[in-house]
Image (cartoon, rainbow, N blue to C red):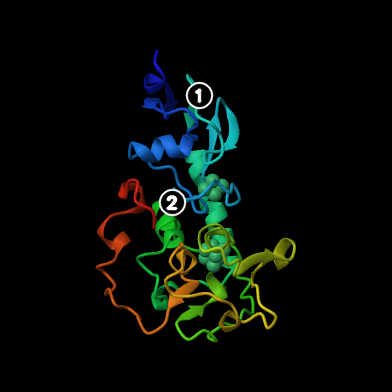
Amino acid sequence: MTELEQSFSLDGEDLPFQAGDTVLQAATRVGRYIPHLCWHPDFAAHGSCRICTVKANGRAAAACTVQASPGLDVESDTEELNAQRKTLLQMLFVEGNHFCPSCEKSGHCLLQATAYQMGMEGPHFEEFYPDRPVDASHPDILLDFNRCILCELCVRASRDVDGKNVFAIGGHGIGTRLLVNSASGQLADTPMALGDRAASICPVGVILPKRRGFAVPIGERRFDAAPVSEQGESPP
Ligand code: SF4
Ligand code: FES
């Protein structure tokens, strides 16, 4: 068997993979959906949200970090794993303030789309309603921390692509927060610009361009057209 013919099993179906692929990379390449939030094809895996947890040879593992290997037996689309994913999503929703109907990212939001995909119909847990003021200091970009799911994609994009280190994650446990790296803590006092990769990477509605509200009408947005499981390789 050549390198290109190597395969592993995903939910009982043989999937080819390339050397160095993770299970999530290999699955995404052939259009097979494994739920994920903190993974993005342009960046190294972060392995923090655990939405992509699968069973690999019977053991729980993050599909975005576990390497594909010949004969690996991966289960993903099972009642048990999807129920765990739904619980994680419900916890994310109550930990922040997610008012989907009034959010500019509604219909483009990976958290919302994944919740629909997992059949989430309500928060289940008691809402925390944290107090998280928005940062509207920047002339072109609004930060609404209420929706942050701590995926670190903006941290990685600003550091690794933009070379600016505008964002960081700080605090511990339930106090973990997205921070802006400036003396004032305000975005206006950073070199962040609208054209930065970090300005367009957020999978939810935290980092938003100003003066562009609802340019695409609700009902005509990406996840209105097709569920997240049918979106193939293109990132959010
Ligand atoms: Fe992720 Fe967006 Fe929060 Fe940054 S602001 S950590 S990209 S959810
Ligand atoms: Fe794998 Fe977040 S996508 S842990």
Q: Is residue 108 left or right of residue 142?
A: left
Q: Amino acid at mark 2?
A: Met
Q: Is residue 99 above or below residue 31?
A: below
Determine the residue positioned at 53% across, 85% down. Answer: 136
- Can you name the residue that lies furthest to the right here? 172
Q: CA distance from mark 2 to mark 1?
A: 27 Å
Q: Which secondary structure, mark 1?
A: loop
Residue receiving disc 1: 69
How many C-alpha atoms fall within 10 Å of the one at disc 2: few (<14), some, or many (≥20)?
some
Determine the residue positioned at 40% across, 70% down. Answer: 105
Q: Which secondary structure, mark 2?
A: loop
Q: Is residue 115 above or below residue 80?
A: below
Q: Is residue 111 left or right of residue 148?
A: left
Determine the residue positioned at 64% across, 80% down. Answer: 131
Q: Is mark 2 within 8 Å of ligand 2?
A: no
Q: Is mark 1 within 8 Å of ligand 2?
A: no
Percent x, y of residue 114: 43, 55
Determine the residue positioned at 34% across, 51% down. Answer: 234
Percent x, y of residue 101: 39, 75
Instruction: Please give the label number shown on residue 118.
Output: 2
Q: Amino acid at mark 1?
A: Ser
- Residue closest to the eye, 86 or 17: 17
How many C-alpha atoms fall within 10 Å of the one at disc 1: few (<14), some, or many (≥20)?
some
Q: Quadrant of residue 130?
A: bottom right
